[in-house]
Amino acid sequence: MTASRLRALQRDVQRYVDEPAAPRAATWMRHVVDSGGVGAARRLGIYADGYRLRLIEALEADYPAVRHVAGETSFERWARGFIDDHPSRHPNLRWYGADFAGWLRRAAPRRPALADLAGFEWAVGLAFDAADAPVITVDDLARLSPQLWPGLSFSLHPAVQRLTLWTNAPALWAAAETGLPLRARRGDRATAWAVWRRELMPRYRTLPADEAWALGAAARGRNFAQLCAGVCRWVPEAQAPLRAATLLRTWVVEGMVSAVLTQ
């Protein structure tokens, strides 16, 4: 078989696996022969079914809480819909379900907790898988010269993430971990959350508005003086340095900061 014919074979089999019901599916079977009483359509169908089942298993592994809350039947239906819309493009199945939360938000708008839960569950998985990195201590901060503080910026640990949720998704996730039922609820307003890893365990908590802003600003490389200026939206200017320092100390104690960068 020539290289060009091999590429054509690989392309057509992939197209069939991605779209077995497509009008051109019959023409994509031309490379497959009947064998042992099993027709070409059946042989390719087995392969296509196996492909989808493997992707469903990958989604189940990444989103066990979503499966628990949605129920097995609904989860499989949504998983198959996601697979139809998102053929696998990454060689590592670990990253296949990255867009599942966004897809659920569009596909199941009447169940917003499922999309929130998927986003939260993915964030927890990312926190667990994030690269190792050092963390600084409060003593490290104390050793810094006061003259350096305005220009200090901070490198957050790779596991640190910030997300916004409208529902009680973290409580649903915790309940699913123990197999307990819990009713999904939507709040009157969105809530900011931090997700990170400490001592090999994912952690999470809500963030007040000023901390949510400050954590995002620190992640974007804003320095301490800029953090102080930003939190003035929530506290008087005279209290801003203390508030910014308190937030920074909290992040350090919780293992969210990997390094202090001086200008």
Image (tube, helix red, strand yellow):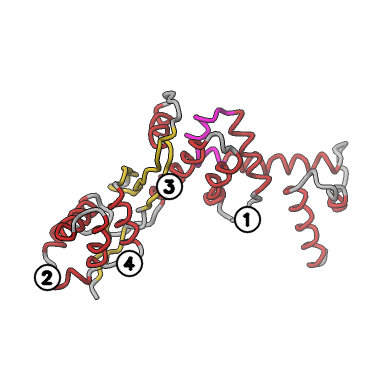
| Residue underneath mark 1 | 89
- Quadrant position of residue 108: top right
Magenta residues, start to end: 58-72
Tell me the crowding category of disc 3: few under 14, some 14 to 19, or many 20 or more residues within 10 angstroms, Cα based.
many
User: Separation of disc 3 and disc 2 at Cα?
Assistant: 36 Å
Q: Please report whichever mark, 2 or 4, sits nearer to the chain's N-terminal start.
A: 2
Magenta stretch: residue 74 in it? Answer: no
Tell me which residue sits at (78%, 45%) in the image.
20
Q: Nearer the viewer, residue 35 or 207?
A: 207
Relative horizontal placement of residue 79, taking residue 126 as reference (left or right): right
| Residue underneath mark 3 | 123
User: Separation of disc 3 and disc 1 at Cα?
Assistant: 21 Å
Tell me which residue sits at (80%, 43%) in the image.
21
Q: Please report whichever mark, 2 or 1, sits nearer to the chain's N-terminal start.
A: 1
Question: Which quadrant, please, contains the C terminus?
Answer: bottom left
| Residue 70 x/y as whole percent | 54, 30
Residue at the far top in the pictured view: 181
Tell me which residue sits at (73%, 43%) in the image.
48
| Residue underneath mark 4 | 221
Q: Amino acid at mark 4?
A: Gly
Disc 2 to disc 4: CB gap under 8 Å: no
Residue 97 disc label: none
| Residue 17 x/y as whole percent | 74, 47
Q: Please report whichever mark, 3 or 2, sits nearer to the chain's N-terminal start.
A: 3
Q: Please report whichever mark, 3 or 1, sits nearer to the chain's N-terminal start.
A: 1
Residue 197 visible in rendering: yes
| Residue 41 x/y as whole percent | 84, 42
Relative horizontal placement of residue 186, taking residue 205 as reference (left or right): right
